[in-house]
C-alpha cells in the first residue's frame, strides 16, 4: 500500500511525539482535526493540541500534517442536551481553528507560509495525489 495516500485523522488525541513522528516517518499524513478537544478525560485541550502542532512543525513535518476542527453539524438524534453541550464547549463551531489555533501558532512564531502550507497546500497535494 502506498502510505502517501493514507490519512490518519483524529491524530491529536495524543501528545506522544514518538508515536506521531513514527507514523509520519512511515509516510502517512496526519489529520490534527480534533479541535477544540479536551472533552474526553486524558486528552489534551486545544492549547496542548496546538503545542503538538508546533512541535511537529519544528520537527520538520509541516509538509505532512493538516489542521481542522471537530465541530459537527447539530443533529437532533444526539439529543438537545448533547447539542447544547457541544455549543457551550465550542461556540465558534467551524471557525474554531481559524479564530483560535492559527492565531496561537502565529504567536508561537510559525510563519504565514507554513500556515498556508498546512491549511491550503497540504490538503491540495493530498487530494490531488501529488
Image (cartoon, grey):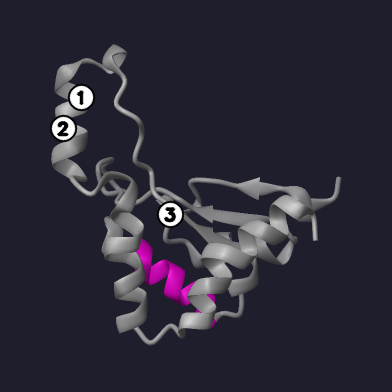
Residue at label 1?
82
Residue at label 2?
85
| Quadrant the C terminus occupies | bottom right
| Residue at 41%, 50% in the rendered image | 13
Look at the image and give the residue range highlighted in magenta. Answer: 48-58
- Image location (x, y in percent) of residue 5: 76, 50
Measured along the vertical axis of the image, is residue 35 above or below residue 21? above
How many discs mark residues in the rendered view?
3
Q: Nearer the viewer, residue 122 or 10?
A: 122
- Image location (x, y in percent) of residue 125: 71, 61
Decide: marks 2, 1 in contact (CB < 8 A)? yes
- Image location (x, y in percent) of residue 41: 26, 43
Q: Circle 2 sits in a helix, a strand or a loop, which is it?
A: helix
- Tell whether position 54 is magenta: yes
Q: Inspect this view and state whether residue 21 appears.
A: no
Q: Nearer the viewer, residue 76 or 30?
A: 76
For residue 47, side relative to residue 25 (left or right): left
Between marks 3 and 2 in the image, the one whose residue lies nearer the viewer:
2
Give neighbour class at mark 1: few <14, some 14-19, many 20+ (Cα, 10 Å).
some
Give neighbour class at mark 3: few <14, some 14-19, many 20+ (Cα, 10 Å).
some
For residue 114, side relative to residue 107 (left or right): right
Amino acid at each position: 500500500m502506498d502510505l502517501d495516500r493514507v490519512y490518519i485523522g483524529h491524530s491529536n488525541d495524543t501528545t506522544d511525539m514518538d508515536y506521531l513522528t513514527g507514523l509520519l516517518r512511515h509516510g502517512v499524513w496526519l489529520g490534527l482535526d480534533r479541535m477544540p478537544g479536551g472533552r474526553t478525560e486524558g486528552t489534551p485541550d486545544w492549547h496542548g493540541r496546538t503545542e503538538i502542532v508546533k512541535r511537529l512543525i519544528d520537527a520538520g513535518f509541516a509538509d505532512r500534517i493538516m489542521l481542522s476542527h471537530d465541530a459537527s453539524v447539530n443533529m437532533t438524534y444526539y439529543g438537545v442536551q448533547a447539542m447544547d453541550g457541544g455549543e457551550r464547549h465550542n461556540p465558534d463551531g467551524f471557525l474554531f481553528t481559524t479564530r483560535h489555533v492559527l492565531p496561537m501558532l502565529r504567536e508561537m512564531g510559525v510563519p504565514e507560509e507554513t500556515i498556508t502550507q498546512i491549511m491550503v497546500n497540504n490538503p491540495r497535494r493530498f487530494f490531488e495525489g501529488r
